[in-house]
Amino acid sequence: MLSVIVITKNESASISRCLASVSFADEIIVLDSSSEDNTVELCQQFTEKVFSTDWPGFGLQKQRALNKATGNWVLSIDADEVVSPALQNEIIQAMETVAIDGFEIPRLSQYCGKTIQHAGWYPDYVLRLFKRNKGRFSEDLVHERVIVEGLIKQLIEPLEHDAFINPDEVLHKINTYSSLGARKLYQQGKRTSLIQAIFKGLWTFSRTYLLKAAFLDGQQGLMLAISNAEGTYYKYLKLLDLQRTEGN
């Protein structure tokens, strides 16, 4: 039995396509955190198991969703991701593998209308399919991960990911994730300076555009490298602000 778990907040633009792609699952669980659009109503067209809760951070929220799953296998998917028919078939076959406890899936992402093949974005292996009694989520506020006790293998077919649809979404996610990232660093005891924030932003651009060959993805590759640099710069700038407002 396969349980699919999804967390949502204001995902009306993408959630229907996401949930339609996992209709082969035995159970779909959606955990929503105060959506202000019609995300909940759209989800209810696909499953009766739609729950509402507060927002404790990505790791804890996904663990809450996992706690509601009843299947022996779990597929964790984000609202902006889609399971292709080819990946669906591979997942069904993978669950028959008794000796393996979890599977990493390559993720193929789009940035403002273009599929990104470089910049460290592909193959972007993410552990998403696992035996329920073998996996749990880390408690990270952002960039959470699945921790599996047992053997892990990689699938071949990619998970389709509409990472950034347009520049407005890029700016929104830069702001959201840089805030969460700064808070995570602060809680870990990390501290910074303005010079370090600038340097880390510049290094992120160089690493993405040159070392990871984002330039091969053309205009969108350049845009991606710039937005990655901005995200890093603002994360450390917000960490600096936390040092100023909350203590040391």
Image (cartoon, grey):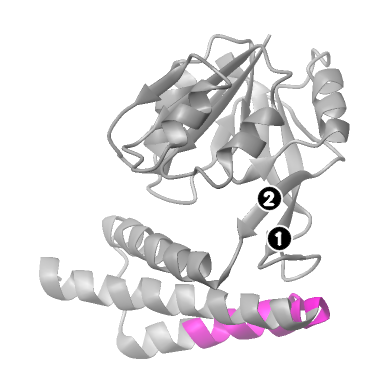
Q: Secondary structure at mark 1?
A: strand
Specify which label sits upstream in the sequence, 1 or 2. 1
**Disc marking residue 161:** 2
Label 2 Cα neighbours within 10 Å, binned few <14 / some 14-19 / many ≥20: many
In depth, the one of 10 and 37 nearer the eye is: 37
Q: Would residue 223 be seen by someone viewing this image from the given angle?
A: yes
**In the image, is 234 to the left or to the right of 231?**
left
Instruction: Identify the image quadrant of the C terminus.
Output: bottom left
Position of residue 144 measured from the top left corner of the image (x, y, whole percent): 49, 44
Position of residue 172 measured from the top left corner of the image (x, y, whole percent): 43, 65
The image quarter containing residue 197 is bottom left
**Disc marking residue 171:** none
3D distance between C-alphas at marks 1 and 2 = 6 Å
**In the image, is 164 to the left or to the right of 60?**
right
Q: Residue at x 71, y 60 (%)?
A: 110
Q: Of the residues shown, which amino acid type is indicated by label 1? A: Gln
Position of residue 178 measured from the top left corner of the image (x, y, whole percent): 39, 66
- Magenta region: 201-217
The image quarter containing residue 22 is top right
Q: Main secondary structure of the magenta part?
A: helix
| Placement of 210 over or under 132, stated as above or below | below
Report if the CB atoms under discs 1 and 2 are less than 8 Å apart. Answer: yes
| Placement of 161 over or under 74, stated as above or below | below
Q: Is residue 86 magenta?
A: no
Position of residue 152 measured from the top left corner of the image (x, y, whole percent): 73, 31
